Amino acid sequence: MTKINKRVKSNVDDLADQIVEESKKEVKKKAPIRFDRVISTGSVLLDLAISGGRIKGGGIPPGILFEIYGPSGAGKTAVLASICASAQRNGGTVRLRDPEARLDKEYAETYGMSIDKAGFDYSRPDTVEELFIDLWEWDNRKEGVVNIFGADSIASLSTELEMGDNDGDKRGQRQAKLFSQSLRKSARIIGQEDLLVLFTNQLRQGEFGEVTSGGKALEYYASLRGRVSKKGMIEKVVKLSSGKEVKKIIGIESQIYISKSTIDDPYRSCPFSILFGVGIDDIRDQLQWYKDITKETKYDVFDGKTYVAMEKAIQHIEENNLEIKLRERTIELWKEIEFKFKIERKPKVWF
């Protein structure tokens, strides 16, 4: 007997209805998305791509479902962990579900997420039913801050039917049906102003092109969807005492494309880099983006100083505590570009 059967004697759907109906009595009516509570993704450029047109600096507001999807090894878990870390730094709690059982303390700390911090709740569910019961029953979140319910990755979740002793889910449709039912019942809970729901999902090749697990439900219910793709490798060359050079891959270069957004303009994209053992290299990304946009041949590190080598430019920024100044420069240039694309029209005439 699985864990869910031990906890639930009645039908799972009946329990879901009961929990959601009880929560409605206590939850305030859903308010408009609050941009005064946005949290950072750990990437200035991604923050801007998500909501830079709504609030200076951008970021992710609570009250939404954010699906991060893409192929294996592109950085989905890294983005999720970085967002969870941001919530923790702002006083929020994190309930993280890890169906793939991949998270460890060292990996979490690389992205600033503390699994030992009070308010961090971690488990490894087996089924879709378990995942959503954990969402419906989470009633000890902190008020006035952004709390995160995350799942990495929902593609690994099975169903009670599939894991049963009978013939199981022969047609493989139960997972998609459960996601559709559960998300419909969860919409009011997800819309609470202190909650951000994050799901990572795998991108696969289907009969008619790219598909994501869980059917179409996540695509419909997500307010924000980001497709992550790997673009290249970050290599480092060192010289040995013998004079010979050795090359090693120390990270990856990825990109996120906002394929759906109901909180700001969609279809923006931005680069982000991941250094192994370090995390998202936001300084690298901003320096490269500024160089590409301005068509400069060197990396500009302020006050007329430039570097040809990226590593030297990063070192200069860090040693001189220029991270905030770099962020402000990135935001201002991004705003200037967006303003150039702004369309001015008279109000629509209605008949």
Image: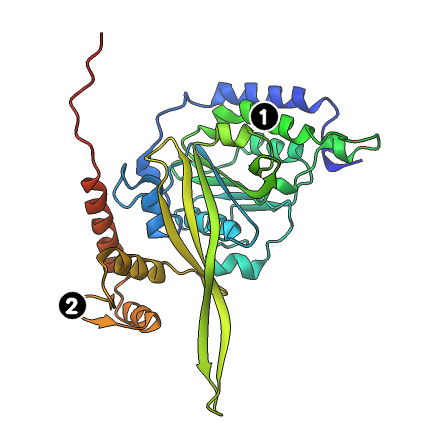
Up the image or down, 270 lies above or below 128; here it is: below
In the visual, does 177 lie left or right of 312? right
- Which image quadrant is residue 272 in? bottom left
Which residue is label 1 attached to? 180
Q: Residue 178: image x %, image y %?
A: 64, 27
x 31%, y 43%: residue: 58
What quarter of the picture does the N terminus occupy? top right
Estimate the x, y position of residue 229 in percent, counting from the top left.
Answer: 48, 50
- At 20% across and 32% down in the image, what residue appears? 343
Disc 2 packing (10 Å; few <14; some 14–19; many ≥20): few
* Crowding at mark 1 (Cα within 10 Å: few <14, some 14-19, many 20+): some
Q: Which of the marked residues, 1 or 2, is nearer the chain's N terminus?
A: 1
Is residue 273 depicted above or below 50 in this figure? below
**Which type of secondary structure does the marked residue at label 2 adopt?**
loop
Q: What secondary structure is marked by label 1? A: helix
Which residue is the site of mark 2? Answer: 303
